[in-house]
């Protein structure tokens, strides 16, 4: 195993950081939650709501950091960085760009959780963008690529009870590469935003028995009234009993929603169990009922390991409206999907919400506004975000973060071979004329790797009803193969092949984009037809702008709340005509302003721009518009 050399002595590494020395970087706008960030314990909540144990330690907080040339094999700490906020963000306390030619280093000490003797110690990272090399006590223990998924490292063999040194080295090319990166670019402009490099989700330790639950996946069957569970466990011995219990009345681990009683159970045999659910209660936006779940391993009548989580009874499917256009159905009932494009960016934390309350806030507001769906746009959120969508009853369309784009200005900042492969043609709401990006085979393989990891990390969240592999031809390649793979990997959800992108006859959904007013330029009767983006009405609110110039929205800029509401209602009335004639869903751009885009329902720092009662009434009238 490789060794790492740090110029930081253990004595210096053991010094506890003085939280009073930390402060946000820069002078750009911030949300109301920025002042609530505790540098001694940022984002202290348990990070994995689907699978909870009590014996864990949160490693968020102030770490030493350095930025070195990419080839450097050692580093000298330059200061403190607040984990888990990306180094470019204000809340990191650093606010520096990194780029392809440099590496970002982190270091801190830690002790093992209590009662760890004879158990395994697992080191968890929620997400690190993009290539992370992990060292414990100078020994390399893991290397992980992919900026959007959690990964776990078993450090039992190298960790000691106290005074362990954890070092993380990160390399991130952002858009000067074919790696999935969403809206991040090294030269932010227009619809492209500040890069996110390094640790941007919670880092934590967990102590588990040698015999323990590793993961589970739950799928409901409404017609049979069952939930099937695939359970992965490590170290199971002959005679051990693995069991799944379903809990009535709430989420098993949550003090806010305690379960009341076990209503059904089943033994896990060869990794599989089927639980018969009595008096089925389904999950929907109107009634987001959740069942608690407990999975345990017993040996000679004694529980060796157990995890608490939750699941729901819900099914997404396709129906036809009286023999005409295809529509989407939830739990067998036709339902128009309507919600905002949600990019999940923050002026203070970039990819990372300042607090858990802030993370939940956008979902709560979206529900208050009368929407029933969110399109999570080319970003993946922390697990707790999807947990809150489950709790609030918000359907999610989940995008894959794009690996490319064809936009002038940002393309010209990249290496020639990267830029050349992204000068493809976008068909723009037509069935003709689109071309693929020229993606190297190794990066196609990486796309599949990261997309698989994203689906596996998120598939237990019942709020997700649609997968979206591509957006507007950005990095789009081998569409049918990618869609077929997605449907095979998860046949329980619909697949929107390329939202607003180049069309092929595959998947479940044909998706048009049209700005600013809603329109459907193409309809294909063999697919569910949706308006994947429209709107983007610009309304800058003084005092809540990222920058004072270059602010923009789609179409004319509004100058008052009334102008904004009148234009929004005008668009809603237009949208209803497309619902009559076959449109099954619509996505309005967007939840918040992002950097110099001022087309949000809220400002970037989360000040609501709209007249909420009127806004909700309009949105509900759209959802309830009868299809013809």
Image (spheres, rainbow, N blue to C red):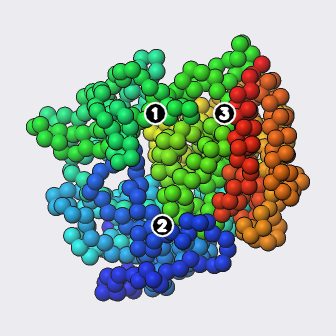
Q: Nearer the viewer, mark 1 or mark 3?
A: 1
Q: Quadrant of residue 140?
A: bottom left
In the image, is residue 526 above or below residue 596?
above
Image quadrant in which you'd find residue 26: bottom right
Q: Which residue is mark 2?
A: 84
**Of label 3 and label 2, which has the lower sequence position?**
2
Mark 2, Cα crowd under 10 Å, few <14 / some 14-19 / many 20+, is many
Answer with mark 2 or mark 1, whichever residue precedes in sequence. Answer: 2
Residue drawn at (34%, 42%) of the image: 258
Could you tell whether 524 is left or right of 375 in the image?
right
Quadrant assignment, res 496: top right
Q: Quadrant of the C terminus?
A: top right
Disc 2 from disc 1: Cα separation: 32 Å
**Alpha carbon separation for disc pair 3 and 2:** 33 Å
In terms of depth relative to the viewer, which is nearer, 191 or 186?
191
Viewer-nearest residue: 207 or 136: 207
Disc on res. 289: 1
Distance of mark 1 from mark 3, alpha carbons? 19 Å
Name the side, left or right, on which 427 lies relative to 206: right
Query: Dot 2 lies on which element?
Result: loop
Q: Is residue 41 left or right of residue 604?
A: left
Helix, strand or loop at mark 3: strand
In the rendered image, which residue does mark 3 sit on?
337
Q: Secondary structure at mark 1?
A: loop
């Amino acid at each position: 195993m490789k060794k790492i050399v740090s110029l930081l002595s253990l004595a210096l590494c053991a010094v506890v950081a003085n939280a009073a020395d930390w402060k946000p970087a820069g002078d750009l706008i911030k949300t109301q939650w920025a002042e609530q960030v505790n540098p001694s314990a940022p984002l202290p909540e348990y990070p994995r709501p689907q699978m909870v144990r009590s014996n864990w330690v949160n490693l968020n907080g102030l770490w030493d950091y350095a930025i070195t040339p990419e080839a450097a094999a050692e580093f000298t700490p330059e200061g403190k960085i607040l984990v888990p906020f990306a180094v470019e963000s204000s809340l990191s306390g650093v606010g520096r760009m990194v780029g392809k030619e440099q590496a970002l280093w982190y270091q801190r000490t830690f002790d093992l959780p209590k009662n760890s003797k004879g158990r395994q110690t697992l080191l968890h990272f929620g997400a690190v963008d993009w290539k992370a090399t992990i060292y414990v006590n100078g020994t390399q223990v893991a290397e992980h690529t992919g900026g959007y998924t959690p990964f776990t490292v078993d450090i039992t063999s190298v960790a000691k009870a106290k005074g362990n040194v954890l070092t993380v080295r990160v390399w991130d090319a952002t858009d000067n590469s074919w790696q999935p990166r969403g809206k991040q670019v090294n030269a932010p402009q227009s619809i492209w935003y500040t890069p996110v490099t390094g640790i941007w989700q919670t880092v934590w330790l967990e102590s588990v028995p040698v015999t323990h639950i590793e993961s589970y996946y739950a799928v409901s069957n409404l017609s049979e009234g069952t939930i099937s569970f695939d359970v992965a466990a490590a170290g199971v011995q002959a005679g051990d009993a693995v069991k799944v219990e379903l809990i009535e009345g709430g989420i098993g681990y949550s003090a806010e929603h305690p379960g009341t009683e076990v209503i059904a159970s089943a033994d896990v045999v060869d990794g599989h169990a089927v639980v018969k659910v009595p008096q089925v209660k389904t999950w929907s936006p109107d009634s987001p009922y959740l069942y608690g779940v407990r999975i345990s391993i017993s040996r000679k009548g004694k529980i060796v390991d157990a995890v608490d989580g939750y699941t729901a009874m819900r099914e997404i499917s396709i129906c036809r409206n009286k023999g005409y256009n295809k529509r989407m159905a939830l739990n067998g009932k036709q339902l128009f999907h309507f919600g905002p494009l949600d990019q999940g960016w923050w002026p203070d934390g970039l990819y990372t919400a300042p607090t858990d309350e802030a993370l939940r806030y956008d979902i709560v507001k979206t529900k208050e506004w009368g929407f029933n769906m969110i399109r999570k746009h080319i970003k993946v959120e922390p697990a707790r975000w999807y947990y809150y969508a489950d709790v609030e009853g918000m359907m999610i369309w989940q995008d894959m973060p794009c690996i490319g784009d064809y936009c002038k200005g940002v393309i010209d900042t990249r290496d020639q071979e990267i830029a050349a492969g992204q000068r493809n043609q976008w068909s723009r709401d037509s069935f003709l004329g689109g071309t693929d990006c020229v993606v190297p085979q190794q990066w196609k393989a990486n796309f599949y790797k990261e997309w698989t990891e994203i689906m596996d990390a998120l598939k237990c969240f019942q709020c997700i009803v649609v997968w979206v592999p591509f957006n507007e031809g950005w990095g789009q390649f081998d569409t049918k193969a990618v869609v077929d793979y997605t449907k095979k990997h998860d046949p329980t959800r619909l697949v929107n092949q390329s939202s607003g992108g180049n069309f092929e006859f595959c998947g479940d959904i044909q998706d048009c984009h049209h700005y600013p007013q809603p329109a459907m330029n193409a309809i294909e009767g063999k697919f569910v037809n949706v308006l994947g983006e429209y709107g983007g009405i610009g309304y800058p609110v003084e005092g809540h702008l990222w920058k004072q110039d270059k602010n923009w929205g789609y179409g004319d800029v509004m100058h008052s709340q009334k102008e904004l509401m009148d234009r929004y209602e005008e668009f809603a009335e237009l949208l209803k005509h497309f619902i009559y004639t076959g449109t099954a869903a619509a996505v309005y751009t967007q939840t918040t302003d992002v950097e110099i885009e001022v087309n949000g329902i809220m400002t970037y720092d989360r000040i609501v721009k709209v007249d909420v009662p009127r806004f909700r009434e309009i949105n509900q009238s759209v959802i309830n518009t009868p299809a013809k």
